[in-house]
Image: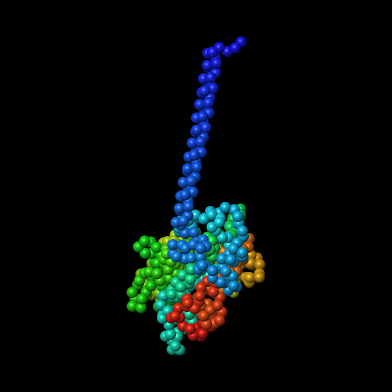
Amino acid sequence: MGRSEEEWEEIRRERRKKRKRQVLMTRLIFGIFLLACVALAAFLIFRTIGSSSGKQNTPGTTDTQGTVSDQQTAVTEKGEDPQTAGTENGAQGETEAVTEVQSETQTEYDASQLTAWEPTKVTHVFFHSLVVDPSKAFSLTGDSGWDSMTPGFCQWMTTVYEFNQMLQQMYDKGYILIDMHEMIDETTDESGTVHVTPKSVMVPNGKIPVVMSFDDLSYYHAYDNRGIASKVVLDENGKPVCEYIREDGTVETGDYDYIPILDKFLEAHPDFSWHGAKGTIALTGYNGILGYRTDIDYKVKEHLMTDQAQWLDAHPDFDWDAECAEARKVAQAIKDDGWVFASHTWGHMHIGDASLEKIKEDTDKWEQYVAPLIGGSDTIIFAHGQDLANWDQDYASTDKFKYLKSQGFDIFCNVDSTQYYVQIGDEYLRMGRRNLDGYRLWQCVYGGKDEVSDLFDASSVIDPDRPSDASFYSL
């Protein structure tokens, strides 16, 4: 029996409704797709504009400081282009997507904009407190034409002039500051032991990673009246600057040592720092830290050295607790500013020659009277160029290493004049450092041993007020 006209009409109505729903659904899907395309196009346009306005430091481009890539083709001591060395010697060819954010410029980088450097191809340079007035540091005042301390200041110290020249030339060559922790991954096992593994150092294309460290920022009494800053203090904005005492006793504050000098340089050249890195400051404790007389001997007045006793006599109102509180505040401001602290041993000791018992005594003093002021550290930088073992010995098997490792140290540094020397064991990063001091500059300019050509031109860096007499630089 066939359907009635009313039934066919009902079927046609249902079909028309179905077709309308299909049309509406198709239009909805198309509208969503169109909106997605518009959003994607807007995102790509925004990213393109943002990338072109940020610092990319890619070859053939000029950044906002006017540094072009052809300034980054300096030849190293071995005849290698640093950029080529970073790609062929240092690069590990990582292909996974990498996104890094450099805090100073807020520039985003993807894998194509970064170069991977092996940690064994990272150089490490170091300095002592900077000389503000060469005529005082390198004074010729003794009966023999110079005093007994002149050779030491000539050899160990770099002047403010030299440091500024080095910074500019290293920046022009494409160097970028990194922290040593960028070179390793760290994991902690159930016993609390920290284990380390090598990690590629990822920096923007055309950049060369470098580590900087600075020894003895304690402003020893022996530095008094030698043309060197006397203390780190905070300016009106809470930023670390340095106190400097003029010949007439006038006290000034400003850029009189490496902390405020490097800070100011980075304000003008933020792409000289990767992830906010600045430098590692190695501290002793026997004269206090940062120019503050924080060692316990200044409080109990026992076992005082002559210069300590003289200083206390000249400061009868000295308050040890207040001094420590101020030092702690300044140290925290320095850390907040991007700097890292390390142990230089409490007594600036010859750690290679010392017995394990002496090392324990010294470390105990550092942990009591320095570590609490700076918040501790996992890095130890040895004085006098010494180390716990020779390079060819099993480092981790020595009793001295085992003790220092048990005290929380994972990074160990000595002095080595080669371009780079890095060892990474299961429990340590061991790194040699290059002394960019008067001795090194004199050897480069006058001694026929140019070992810094990968960093800068020593003849244009050396301070014209630095004595050139070889007798000041003989070890």
Residue 463 visible from this viewpoint = yes
Q: Quadrant of residue 326?
A: bottom left
x, y (%) of residue 152? Answer: 49, 80
Q: Residue furthest bottom?
A: 144
Instruction: Look at the image and tell me in which quarter the C terminus lies.
Output: bottom right
432 sits left or right of 162 in the view: right
Q: Position of residue 241 (x, y in %)?
A: 40, 67
User: Residue 473's spot in the image, x, y percent?
Assistant: 51, 82
Percent across and percent down for residue 77 are 58, 74
Q: Residue at x 35, y 72 (%)?
A: 251
Q: Residue at x 50, y 75 (%)?
A: 457
* Camera-nearest residue between 158 and 346: 158
Q: Nearer the viewer, residue 109 or 8?
A: 8
Nearest the camera: 374 or 232? 232
Can you tell which quarter of the image residue 4 is in? top right
Determine if residue 221 is in view: no
Q: Which residue does the image show at 48% across and 67% down from the upper left? A: 171
Q: Residue at x 49, y 37 (%)?
A: 32
Number of marks drawn: 0
